[in-house]
Amino acid sequence: MLRTIKYFFYTFFTAVILVSCGQGETLQRYYVDHQEAKNFISQDFPLSMIEIDKSNFTEQQQEAYNSVDKLNFLGYKASQENADTFKSELSKVKAILSNEKYNDLMEFSDKGNKISVKYLGTNQEAEEIILFGSSPDMGFGIVRILGDDMSPDKMITLIEAMQKADIDKSQVENIMNFFN
């Protein structure tokens, strides 16, 4: 009997370890592992910290804005000295985001840099929205948008509105200075 119980626990824990190892690295784990690493910057802030003129928002954009609680930013600064590390870290992030659990939402260019937007969740509700952009000259940045009742469709309209919005750069000065 004791032997059967030991065998059961051994099998159970082996299965748990194999299943958890098979899931690969997550974006959240990548954030945690790199938030204080060399050449990285990490900053969390509530959306309310970024002042945006919402007077021209549509009802859909306003709903999307109100569904967001906070933003998590992780950036890597590229330089000639860390070109190999930059390529390696960029490959890791791209591999994580290529997982089928990350749904494509949209892509756009901003000042010549390609930005991809993905989400975790269903077509009706996103658990998390991810903005990812990279530049060989500057590095890369990932923004995790976290909130409640976030609709992927409404988030598209919000992102489009925020691209046109006049955002006070001093609110994200710490991040901007990191890449300069």
Image (tube, rainbow, N blue to C red):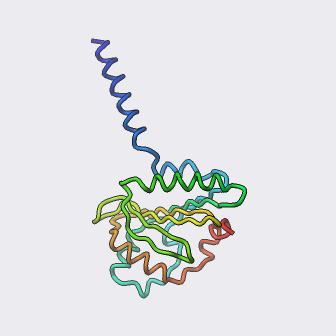
Q: Residue at x 55, y 72 (%)?
A: 113
Looking at the rendered structure, the number of numbered marks drawn on it comes to: 0
Q: Picture quarter containing residue 57?
A: bottom left
Q: Position of residue 43 (x, y in %)?
A: 57, 61
Q: Is residue 40 above or below residue 157?
A: above
Q: Residue at x 37, y 33 (%)?
A: 16
Q: Is residue 80 left or right of residue 159?
A: right
Q: Please state if 105 lies on the left or on the right of 116 as rendered.
A: left
For residue 89, side relative to residue 60 (left or right): right
Q: Residue at x 67, y 52 (%)?
A: 38
Q: Nearer the viewer, residue 49 or 131?
A: 131
Q: Quadrant of the N terminus?
A: top left
Residue 136, by quadrant, is: bottom right
Image coords of residue 58 (percent x, y): 36, 84
Q: Nearer the viewer, residue 134 or 31?
A: 134
Residue 100: image x %, image y %?
Answer: 36, 54
Tell me what residue is drawn at x 45 percent, y 64 percent: 145
